[in-house]
Image: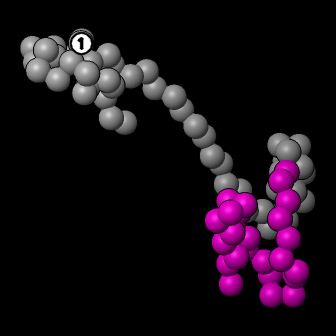
Amino acid sequence: RVHINCCKKTVLFPRPEEELCSKLMCCREVTRSVKAQEDVFIMFASLRTEEKDEVDVLPVVREFADVFPDDILDLPP
């Protein structure tokens, strides 16, 4: 069974004989565990920010910016 905790944003893959637990590991601990041939489940998350285009630089929107000047504040994500 896999234990998914949406509130804590964790996914646990326990062995049947092991108690459910969660542990964050630093890179050094992961390297040590892999070298010791231990079972390791790794998840990597990354966030990336992107610059948004201004509404007035888009050709079509620029042509009609005067139609909805107060309604179009930004582009949707």
| Relative image position of residue 35 (x, y in whole percent) | 86, 54
What residue sits 51% from the left and 28% below the top?
A: 49
| Relative image position of residue 7 (x, y in whole percent) | 68, 63
What residue sits 33% from the left and 25% below the top?
A: 74
Was residue 56 drawn as part of the magenta stretch in this picture? no
| Relative image position of residue 71 (x, y in whole percent) | 25, 27
- Quadrant into which the N terminus falls: bottom right
Q: In which quarter of the image is residue 64?
A: top left
| Relative image position of residue 57 (x, y in whole percent) | 24, 12
Is 60 displayed left or right of 56 in the figure?
left
Determine the secondary structure under disc 1. Answer: helix
Q: Nearer the viewer, residue 54 or 45?
A: 54
* Display colour scheme: one colour
Instruction: Decide if residue 61 is in sight here.
Output: no
Tag 1 residue: 56
Is 3 located above or below residue 45 in the figure? below
Q: Quadrant of residue 3?
A: bottom right
Identified by mark 1, the residue type is: Asp
Which span is picked out in magenta?
1-25
Check disc 1: other Cα within 10 Å, few if <14, some if 14-19, many if 20+.
some
Is 5 located above or below residue 54 in the figure? below
Is 5 displayed left or right of 67 in the figure?
right
Is 48 displayed left or right of 37 in the figure?
left
